Image (cartoon, helix red, strand yellow):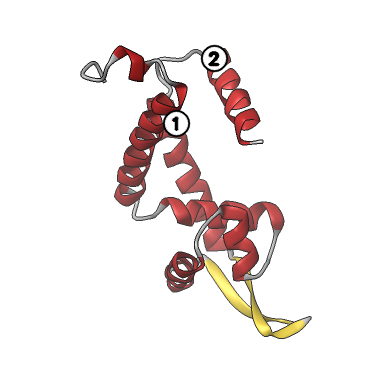
Amino acid sequence: MKEASARLRSKPSWLINRASARAHRLIKESMAAAGGHAYHFAILATLDEFGPDSQVQIGQRCGIDQSDMHTMLNELVDQGHVARTPDPADRRRNLITLTPAGHRRLEALDTTLTEVQDDILAPLSPTERATLTTLLTRILG
């Protein structure tokens, strides 16, 4: 970062982008080492919190493009972490449900992601981490 101009380094948007790129790289590496994908965590966490839902709804909640959602759900179904079942209210669509194996996988990926968060935010105190989270949440609305 020292090679960037001071004027550039003073722009919060530039710093956010740099921090985001570093976080994405570290998360991708750690999830791959754990045999997963960050999208797997997002999907499993969404199902855990909101319960069974359609592929479209889950993708919207996670901010995942539908083509990527299809691929990620196929992987999670193949691994036994989620199940597709016909929606009793609308047989034209499937409900995606978290399985017991998926819940265990979510816990394992959550531990991995927490370790990455600790690495990324190591220079900050717990209070500063909480403040950063609050501020970023406010920025995102």
Please name whichever residue, 112 or 62, is drawn nearer the observer in this view of the structure: 62
Q: Residues within 10 Å of mark 1 (few under 14, many from 20)?
A: some
State the mark number for residue 117. 1
Please name whichever residue, 27 or 48, is drawn nearer the observer in this view of the structure: 27
| Residue 7 visible in the current orientation | yes
Instruction: Tell which circle, 2 or 1, labels the residue nearer the N-terminal end.
Output: 1
Amino acid residing under circle 2:
Glu
Q: Quadrant of the C terminus?
A: top right
Q: Which residue is identified by label 2?
A: 128
Q: Residue at x 43, y 50 (%)?
A: 38
Circle 2 — which element? helix
Q: Quadrant of the N terminus?
A: top left
Outermost residue, front side:
7
Number of numbered markers: 2
Residue 93 in percent (x, y) is at 66, 81
Q: Residues within 10 Å of mark 2 (few under 14, many from 20)?
A: few
Q: Residue at x 53, y 60 (%)?
A: 102
Outermost residue, left side:
3
Circle 1 — which element? helix
Relative placement, left or right, of 101 versus 21 is right
Residue 99 in percent (x, y) is at 58, 65
